[in-house]
């Protein structure tokens, strides 16, 4: 029995799945830093915003390095319990989480948050908080991969993992609702914000919402990867 457990764990250690979880963690850390950047943006603290943007850029770069390592390890893997194409598709969606965090941070640095109505600032903070919650729930989902592998994809573990996916999708829907409400508020204040300001804020809404979109897309790819193995 000990030899069996050791052999299973050896496969896990040599496979792309351990760095896959590390890659997901980098993405969530980037989103957490983005939440801090959003607070700085709304407070007009440009120095802190720039600092957090640099940290997000570093995390995104680290995620890219892990992604490259995962891709390089796949051809050399002796045994993979899932389809390689499904794994790469899943990785692509997961990688986009850090990309959208980076894009959101850069977008905030392009135009200062000046004289924005409080309700719009509050809308952005709520949108950011829910997007972060979605990313964290997704991170919890990816954490279940190790359990799946260690139990050779037991039916019980698969069932527990699958139960998390609808929670990610529900949060992503909540983000969609918040996006729509925030866009309405932005257009209601178009006269005060100006055309360029409206375009900038629309772009920021889209990028922050993209974090939840990609979290849900990656969760869906994970579901397909497990069911089609």
Image (cartoon, rainbow, N blue to C red):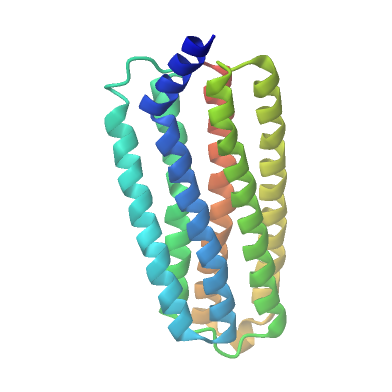
207 or 92: which is nearer to us? 92
- Whether residue 191 appears in this view of the structure is yes
- List x then y, in percent, for residue 11: 41, 20
In the picture shown, does residue 89 fall above or below 178? above
Is 8 on the left or on the right of 68, as rendered?
right
Is 131 on the left or on the right of 56, as rendered?
right
In the picture shown, does residue 40 fall above or below 2? below
- Whether residue 15 appears in this view of the structure is no
113 or 9: which is nearer to us? 9
Q: Quadrant of residue 150?
A: top right
43 or 16: which is nearer to us? 16
Q: How many labels does the image show?
A: 0
- List x then y, in percent, for residue 216: 60, 42
Q: In which quarter of the image is residue 95?
A: top left
Q: Residue furthest front?
A: 2
Q: Residue at x 34, y 35 (%)?
A: 70
Q: Quadrant of residue 139?
A: top right
Q: Which residue is drawn at 70% across and 28% down?
A: 160
The quarter in which the N terminus is drawn is top right
98 or 59: which is nearer to us? 59
Q: Which residue is drawn at 62% across and 86% down?
A: 191
- List x then y, in percent, for residue 28: 52, 53
Q: Which residue is drawn at 46% across and 22% down?
A: 9
- List x then y, in percent, for residue 2: 51, 13
In the picture shown, does residue 118 fall above or below 174? below
């Amino acid at each position: 029995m000990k030899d069996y457990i050791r052999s299973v764990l050896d496969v896990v250690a040599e496979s792309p799945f351990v760095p896959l979880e590390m890659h997901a963690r980098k993405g969530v850390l980037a989103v957490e830093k983005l939440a801090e950047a959003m607070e700085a943006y709304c407070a007009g603290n440009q120095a802190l915003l720039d600092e957090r943007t640099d940290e997000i850029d570093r995390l995104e770069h680290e995620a890219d390095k892990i992604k490259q390592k995962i891709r390089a390890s796949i051809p050399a893997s002796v045994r993979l319990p899932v389809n390689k194409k499904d794994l790469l598709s899943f990785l692509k969606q997961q990688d986009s989480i850090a990309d959208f965090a980076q894009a959101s941070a850069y977008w905030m640095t392009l135009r200062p948050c000046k004289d924005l109505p409080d309700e719009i600032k509050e809308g952005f903070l709520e949108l950011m908080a829910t997007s972060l919650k979605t990313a964290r729930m997704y991170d919890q989902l990816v954490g279940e991969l190790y359990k799946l592998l260690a139990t050779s994809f037991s039916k019980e573990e698969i069932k527990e993992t699958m139960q998390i996916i609808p929670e990610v999708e529900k949060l992503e829907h909540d983000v969609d609702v918040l996006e729509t409400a925030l866009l309405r508020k932005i257009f209601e204040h178009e006269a005060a914000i100006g055309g360029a300001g409206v375009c900038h804020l629309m772009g920021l809404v889209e990028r922050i919402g993209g974090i939840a979109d990609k979290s849900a897309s990656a969760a869906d790819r994970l579901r397909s990867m497990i069911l089609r193995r």
